[in-house]
Image: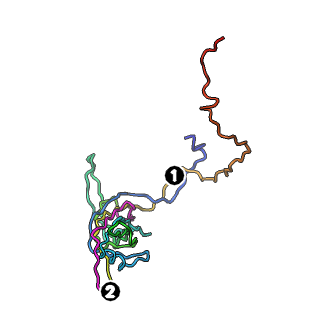
Amino acid sequence: MDQFGNLNDFRRECIDAKKVFDFVIVSLPGNQAGLEFIPANGTDVDDICEALDMGGKIVNVQAEVIIPEDGGCEADMSSPRTDEEVVLDNGEVITLQWVTVTKDMVTFRVTFDVVDENGCVVVAACGTAEIDDIEPENVLLCAPEGTMIDCTLLPTTTIKPFNFTCNGSEEEGDVLTFSARFNLCQAIQSYDFVKLEVLARLCEPRDIILPEETCAPLLPQQCPQIFPGPRSMGNNNE
């Protein structure tokens, strides 16, 4: 306890705190077809489809989820929560609650190259696509009535686009669609704001640390391994 100084300096304080009742990370695997690629770097879909019609191939496909400020998922707070009794490994019985998590839409960034028969890049594309119609999922949490739910998508979400196809018409132009397998990773926690009594002391600012400037002479790097080299311990002849 030496790092905390004199404990007599501490006193009872009452603070507001965000108490976490439960915290889990869940994944939602799935797949969806007919996703529309929306170019975002000035490349026209017509250019992509023309390159594909000329025998080009799509390579170097990468995708990553775009996490909005609101987290990208939310819990249904309007419906009453259903209790569920669960038996733990030690035999204890506890009561948890079912929470419904929904996602209206998940947007992700897609990049790929279109190469010709020689493997040369003829189109470098970057754009977005959206996964919608995602089924709500039920998660079992310690979330009694009165607690709130936070949900956010995680960067570990994986999306694998495949089967790119050009469609469309002369009137509306080309449309590039594809299918995708995905695994949506979500961090979900139940919480409430509480007041806690703690033993604490007020923090004071630390002293400013200034670097010391020295005027020590700079010596050239030496090579003691070769000069003067290791000292000979042989016997000298008299």
- Screen quadrant of the C terminus: top right
Q: Amino acid at mark 2?
A: Glu
The secondary structure type at the circle numbered 1 is: strand
The reply to whether the magenta stretch includes residue 216 is no
User: Which residue is drawn at the image coordinates 37% and 71% (left, top)?
Assistant: 107
- Which contiguous range is marked in magenta? 144-171
Choose the circle earlier in sequence order: 2 or 1.
2
Dominant SS type (magenta):
strand
User: Is residue 28 visible in this depiction of the protein?
Assistant: yes
The reply to whether the magenta stretch includes residue 158 is yes
- Screen quadrant of the N terminus: top right
User: Which residue is drawn at the image coordinates 74% and 45% (left, top)?
Assistant: 215
Mark 2, residues whose alpha carbon is within 10 Å: few (<14), some, or many (≥20)?
few
Q: Which mark is residue 111?
A: none
User: Which residue is drawn at the image coordinates 31% and 75% (left, top)?
Assistant: 54
Outermost residue, front direction? Answer: 118
Is there a contact, CB below 8 Å, between mark 2 and mark 1? no
Vertical comparison of 218 with 174: above or below: above
Q: Which mark is residue 198?
A: 1
Q: Amino acid at mark 1?
A: Val
Determine which residue is flagged by label 2.
172
Question: At which x and y percent is residue 196?
Answer: 48, 56
Question: At which x and y percent is residue 130?
Answer: 34, 73
Question: At which x and y percent is residue 139?
Answer: 30, 62
Please name whichever residue, 33 or 134, is drawn nearer the observer in this view of the structure.
Answer: 33
Please name whichever residue, 77 or 95, is drawn nearer the observer in this view of the structure.
Answer: 77
Please name whichever residue, 65 or 128, is drawn nearer the observer in this view of the structure.
Answer: 128
User: Which residue is drawn at the image coordinates 28% and 79% (left, top)?
Assistant: 167
Instruction: Give the label, 2 or 1, closer to the camera.
Output: 2
Question: At which x and y percent is residue 198?
Answer: 51, 52
The secondary structure type at the circle numbered 2 is: loop
